Image: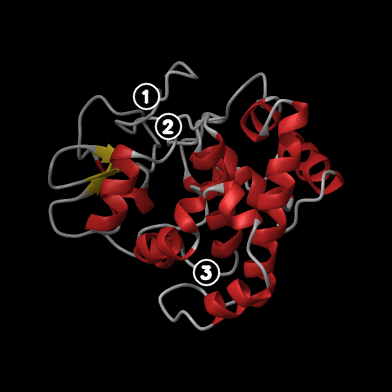
Amino acid sequence: MSGGGVTASGRDAGQGTAGEGAAPGLPAGSEVVVGADGLARTPWGDSSDLMRHYYDTEWGLPVRDEAGLFERLTLEAFQSGLSWATILRKRPAFREAFAGFGPDAVAAFGEGDVERLMADARIVRNRRKVEAAVTNARATVALREGGGLADFVWSFRPAETPRPLRVAEVPTQSAESVALSKALKQRGFAFVGPTTMYALMEAIGMVDTHLVGSHRRGTSGVWPD
């Protein structure tokens, strides 16, 4: 999920931004939202209990295992055109339907499995995306000969990360995400456009786009605050 792609539609009572003086010590001009718990977050990360938990415990932390990376790549593709909250609510069903996102298991899916998934109302029923998930599982298995999906994706980590103060300053793609998209397509992957790949890079900690002032910025261990 791209941090610039979903923002809170409003703030509950007791919340404010750094610019409103809600929390002394935060950078001037930062659009972080200070929640009722006193913690500053990028606005979308305080938009609901579901998103707050995801933001605080998962988003932006490094993912370096094959199955975990394949899951995130698949869900980012399914998220295209939808809200990340929708995907997050459906994630348990996605995991069940896609055999825990084990690449070998999904790579073995046939037409009958595709039809089963298309009949499963608990997930996003988009045939192109379902078929892309199977295609990408097979490409993931094939990529093992070259070191594996995780090493391949992380090889596109940039030399620097953005330091956005405002949501509008969060990129939606980069030179690295364009290059990663092109390289994955050359290796048989589908639904891996530059914007989707940048969202993946954000989600797995390859870049840190927590707004400056967020209590989560710098927590990945990949980038300093």
- Tag 1: residue type? Thr
- Side of 29 where 15 appears, left or right: left
Q: Number of labelled discs?
A: 3
Nearer the observer, 23 or 222: 222
Disc on res. 56: none
Asked if labels 2 and 3 touch by Cβ distance under 8 angstroms, the answer is no
Residue at 64%, 68% (x, y): give it.
129
Residue at 48%, 47% (x, y): give it.
3
Q: Kindly identify which residue carries mark 2.
A: 61
Q: Earlier in the sequence, mark 3 or mark 2?
A: 2
Residue at 68%, 75% (x, y): give it.
111
- Side of 106 where 219 appears, left or right: left
Question: Label 1: few (<14), some or many (≥20) within 10 Å?
Answer: some
Q: Kindly identify which residue carries mark 3.
A: 82
Classify the position of the C terminus by image quarter. top left
* Alpha carbons under labels 3 and 1: distance apart: 27 Å
Q: Quadrant of residue 221?
A: top left
Q: Earlier in the sequence, mark 3 or mark 1?
A: 3
* Alpha carbons under labels 1 and 2: distance apart: 7 Å
- Tag 2: residue type? Leu
Tell me where residue 88 appears, x and y as whole percent: 39, 59
Nearer the observer, 200 or 103: 103
Q: Kindly identify which residue carries mark 1.
A: 219
- Side of 199 where 191 appears, left or right: right
- Tag 3: residue type? Leu
